[in-house]
Amino acid sequence: LARREGVNMGKPVGGEHNIWREWTEKYARRIKKIRENPNPKLARSNIILYEMMYNQARRELDAWESGSKVPVMYCNENSPVRLYMSLGFRTYHIEMFADRLTREQARRYFDLARGHGFPENACDRVQLTAGVGISGHLPPPSICATVPGDCDTMAQALLYVGRFWKVPTFAIDIPFEVNIEAVLYVKEQLEQIVDFCQQTFPDYIRYDEARLTELQKLYEETWKLESEIFELSATKPCPVSGRDALRMPPIQLYDDPMMVDYFRSFRDELKERAEQGKSVLKDGVERFRVYWMCSAPFYEDPFSFLEERGCAVPCYEEGPGAPSRYAVRDYEDAERRFGRALRHPLEEEAGVLVTCHWGNVAERRIQEVLRNSQRLGIEGIVHFMQPGCLPCNNMAKVLGERAEKELGIKNIYIEGWCQDMEKHDEAEFEAKLADWLNLCLAEKEAKQKSQ
């Protein structure tokens, strides 16, 4: 628990922009568009996702404008969001806010972060997390929390936000090891967080274990549905679009029961498509399939570009069902990972944290990607080399070489920017993808003829 300089109870600071109001309007427009003119290549269930996001924006806007005194928690990365919600915080996962900015909003927060000294060659998402966090265009934080380990620069961005607002900040230390000792070590820190928050905000914050258990049950249900979605993605021709494979509900919606409805509806759609042999690919013919790594250009669509050429993108490494994280109350999995079943909701939450595939040694991520590649019949990997991405850029070559050596998978290491579209050259990006895909298809055809 690093800082205790002051406590901000969420008083609005004013300004010309209000993200919650802007998002209320944005998601209302998006829902209207899907209802009136749906894209047949994208999942119909997306409307449920946007309804959840609209409802949250409406609730938070009302709370802010009415002067709610409930403390606001800013967090990011692999945070125990369910715990913060069970304590009673209005929980804002700032990294997810950065991910869902419009193109125009992104430029605003790039300028703000860079004006405060953030370098332009740092990860786009890190810059925008800092920019959104200090903007005052959301209710300011009462406290900030992060989990260093997967991306240290993202953790530092949120700690910087805490210093900017002069509020308490803390960081949870996650060991590399995956065993019961690591779980108990993290659980002890979660207990300290509970005590600290209750003491710091005694009028508003009180740990509700029944609420945490309820939120974990929602997570358990959605994780099972995600696993089914992942298995359906193995169907050929591919029934899922690359845009939907990368579509993830923001973590701050963990408390919304509609999350289960969204994943169930998405699962049912994919099952129907798979049974009918429907595909997003041109002429329904699958010529190649790739695994997408790291991130993607947020305001461009390389997936439709690939699908027009018969290349499926059934999987994103953080997409539904792909990460091999611990799902609560899976006793067999807990025995395998930790040596015994977990016995307490805080232990369960700690078990989820220590199995994040980012914040660990490279071998675990490599093994996960190799395993998923075999299950999905992956033939190529797109490593999106976003400038400043420490975990992905530093590991990409090692991962690619292992995938090619052990499974014959072709790799492309391609640079781009995920949100700074003034720097991202779409035509050049697509030309490189096309050249690589043509080479892969030529090699595949030659190999088939020789056999």
Image (spheres, grey):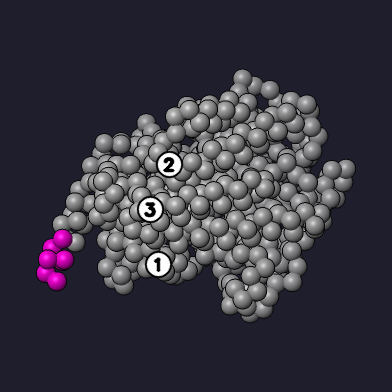
Work out whether 190 lies above or below 10: below
Which one is nearer the viewer's eye here, 173 or 4?
173
Can residue 122 be seen in this snapshot? no
Magenta-drawn segment: 445-451
Name the main secondary structure of what is drawn in magenta.
helix
Q: Split into 4 quadrants, where in the image is the N terminus?
A: bottom right
Query: Disc 3 and disc 1: Cα gap in Å?
Result: 21 Å
Name the amino acid, label 2: Leu
Mark sitting earlier along the chain (3/1): 3
Mark sitting earlier along the chain (1/2): 2
What residue does disc 2 label?
A: 42
What residue does disc 1 label?
A: 375
Q: Position of residue 154 (x, y in %)?
A: 54, 48
Which one is nearer the viewer's eye here, 170 or 273?
273
Query: Disc 3 and disc 2: Cα gap in Å?
Result: 16 Å
Which labelled disc corresponds to residue 276? 3
Is-magenta flag for residue 446?
A: yes
